[in-house]
């Protein structure tokens, strides 16, 4: 009988992807013995509608560039190609339908994001669908996750400590605007993509 695939899904806006995301995915891969991690850039993120988000295609391409050298990482277009709002639970349900019993699903997320996801629409639907792997910084305690208001069902949440938690996409965007250094926060090829395409309000060179 074929072995069950242990499939990690790293969801995010990835605007832009940075070493915090990459370190987290790599740690999850090793600590949870995953076979691969699929990066899943969001289509239209429901929680970030109040601010400008780069095009799905730019975020998808930056994620491809950042993960290209790692044979255990891949990038999915599933959410990017789906019209309308993006809900993590719908993505995980679609993956469950695709793989059936052939894969065990793990959703990798920062500890800050896990509580938001689990208090969202249909939190109880996550129970039994996938295990959450929540990245925390050393010494940081994760509160017990909330379930949906109508249900007692609790999704499984495992925690994992990762370094590099202080890096964030919003800080990188600010650095681009203020012309402060990006080096060592994200792969150089992603920084080059940002500059080449004038992302984050950077005036085009010339
Ligand atoms: P923003 O600054 O806009 O919040 P972000 O850096 O958190 O962006 P997202 O694309 O929103 O990037 O994050 C995707 C996932 O990666 C989320 O689960 C988030 O918690 C996690 N994450 C983000 N930054 C880090 C980091 N430095 N270390 C570990 N996990 C992170
Ligand atoms: Mg964030």
Image (cartoon, rainbow, N blue to C red):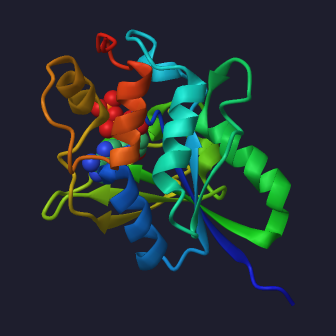
Q: Quick one: quadrant of the C terminus?
A: top left
Residue 176 visible in the snapshot:
yes
Give above or below for 28 relative to 94: below
Residue 10 horizontal/vertical position (percent): 51, 51
Residue lying at the far bottom in this picture: please name it: 1
Residue 71 horizontal/vertical position (percent): 58, 69
Residue 19 horizontal/vertical position (percent): 31, 52
In this view, the residue in front, 190 or 145, is 190
Give above or below for 90 relative to 180: below
Left or right: where 77 falls relative to 159: right
Give above or below for 26 relative to 198: below
Residue at left offset 41%, top offset 12%: 52
Q: Quick one: quadrant of the N terminus?
A: bottom right
Left or right: where 68 falls relative to 200: right
Residue 150 visible in the snapshot:
no
In this view, the residue in front, 44 or 180, is 180
């Amino acid at each position: 009988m074929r072995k069950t695939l242990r499939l990690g899904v790293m969801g995010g806006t990835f605007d832009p992807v940075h070493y915090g995301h990459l370190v987290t995915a790599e740690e999850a891969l090793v600590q949870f013995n995953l076979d691969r991690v699929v990066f899943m850039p969001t289509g239209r993120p429901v929680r970030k509608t109040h601010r400008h988000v780069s095009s799905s295609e730019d975020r998808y391409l930056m994620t491809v560039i950042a993960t290209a050298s790692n044979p255990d990482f891949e990038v999915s277009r599933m959410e990017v190609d789906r019209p309308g709002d993006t809900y993590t639970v719908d993505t995980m349900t679609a993956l469950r339908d695709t793989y059936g019993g052939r894969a065990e699903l793990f959703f990798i997320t920062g500890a800050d994001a896990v509580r938001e996801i689990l208090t969202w629409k249909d939190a109880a639907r996550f129970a039994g669908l996938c295990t959450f792997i929540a990245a925390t910084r050393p010494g940081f305690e994760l509160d017990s996750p909330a379930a949906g208001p109508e249900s007692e069902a609790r999704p499984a949440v495992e925690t994992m400590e990762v370094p590099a938690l202080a890096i964030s996409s919003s800080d990188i965007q600010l650095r681009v605007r203020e012309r402060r250094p990006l080096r060592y926060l994200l792969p150089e090829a992603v920084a080059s993509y940002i500059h080449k395409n004038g992302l984050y309000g950077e005036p085009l060179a010339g």
